[in-house]
Amino acid sequence: MDSKSMEWVYTLEHHLTPKRLIENLEEKTNQSDVENRLETGISMFRPYFVERLGFSQKQAKTALVQLVIASDKIYDFLIESARYRGENKTTQNIRQRYLKILGQLESLLEDCGKIDCDVFYHIPLTLHSIVNVRLLLRQRLDILQRKIIITDIDGELSSLLVRGLQMLISKKGISRAEVSYTIAVMDSLKATDSLNTSVLEDLLCQLDFNTPTFFNYWINYCNKLLEDEPNLHRQKEILIGMEDRISDLEKVVDVTDERDDNAILSIISLKDVNIQMRKILPMVICKQIYEQKKAKIDRDKYLNIIIDEAHNILSYNSERESESWKDYRLETFEEIIKEGRKFGVFLTIASQRPSDISGTIISQLHNYMLHRLINNKDIEAVEKTISYLDKVSFDSLPILPRGSCILAGISAQLPVIIEVSSIPDENRPHNETMVLTKHWRGEPNLSDA
């Protein structure tokens, strides 16, 4: 079974445009062929989904997303059909057909969800189903707002809570998992008898209410505490005392009075930092130093931020964080790439997995040094996002010798292959691949055993 199992979807979209349906109905053209295609396609899709699931959840998710896109297209046809020739019998007939097909596609998605609920819960809701879901969520939010108004909660905190929930509810492509999370947040708040600022703060932290506005709320709160307390050691005590609210912060942040403004190089190692903080800390640090450089433009000095293993920090494929927080994290680095040069700030990234890095970030870079790439996904990601390479260069990527790379970008008129000098032995890190044959010994002497 191959991609032909999805061709019925595209064929269906072609035959179901309002204009074509109206013409066929008025000419009394037999519609059984379209209906048969639909029935056959639905029966083919279930085994196709199971087959994709056998390869990977990502492939299975892609198949379901294609089905969602098809459903949304039919829904657009339904809306568009209202503009055709008023409320006559023909338009009513095609709307009934659209509603029937939308119901069939929705049932197909739910059947696939019974096979793998995890994949099903993380795909976008269809436009057909999302209307009632959003109506329900907004009704719950209205009830919650009436409760918040009569409680003693900080105005800024209550405002960002409502805005955060509204953002989740209105999000384009909201998934069932995000709907469940939004309901869980509102139900927890509704079930809490005595809501106040402190209780709400703790509750939102426990629920991992991971929105940029809530994160900024805590940044401003921290800044105010530190500004009001001039004693350095007391500042450290305040930060450590917030351990329950900002998870793992004390483990990776050390407040010290040692500072060297004349240092030309600072190295920050994240090797002992957990995955969540490995994404948060670089964003916080880079945003802080970038904003400082913007506020104080010094044309005699520039700032170069270098990120190694960038796929761990700039990845767009992350199930551990909300979409809004993911967008906020990536937008920080995208702004540095696009606008930073005006303020003397530059970004250099190194990665062995370009396919895991946001395509927007890769495409905004000005110069590339491409070493050998073997993985097809990485080569495809480079081909889609880098406009400086020609076909010969792409074909050379899998066969580049060790120490060689392709230089492309605004610094080279044409892509060129260059050889990178080896690091002296005394400075070389111990990260070479172990050659097992050098450690093999002769056959063991069985008589000595």
Image (spheres, grey):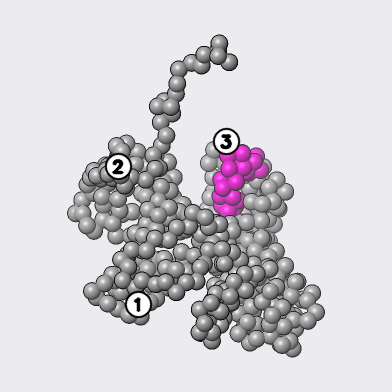
Front disc: 3 or 1: 1
Name the kind of residue labelled 3 in the image: Met
The residue lying toward the viewer, choosing from 387 and 226, is: 226
Q: Which label number is shown at residue 343?
A: none
Residue that label 1 marks: 294
Residue 139 higher or lower than 413, as above or below: below
Q: Earlier in the sequence, mark 3 or mark 1?
A: 3
- For residue 189, say whether it is visible: yes
Residue 154 higher or lower than 65, as above or below: below
Q: Position of residue 412 (x, y in %)?
A: 21, 54
Name the kind of residue labelled 1 in the image: Lys
Residue 41 higher or lower than 234, as above or below: above
Residue 219 higher or lower than 54, as above or below: below
Q: Residue furthest left?
A: 413
Q: Which residues are magenta?
A: 44-70
The residue lying toward the viewer, choosing from 446 and 343, is: 446
Q: Position of residue 118 (x, y in %)?
A: 66, 52
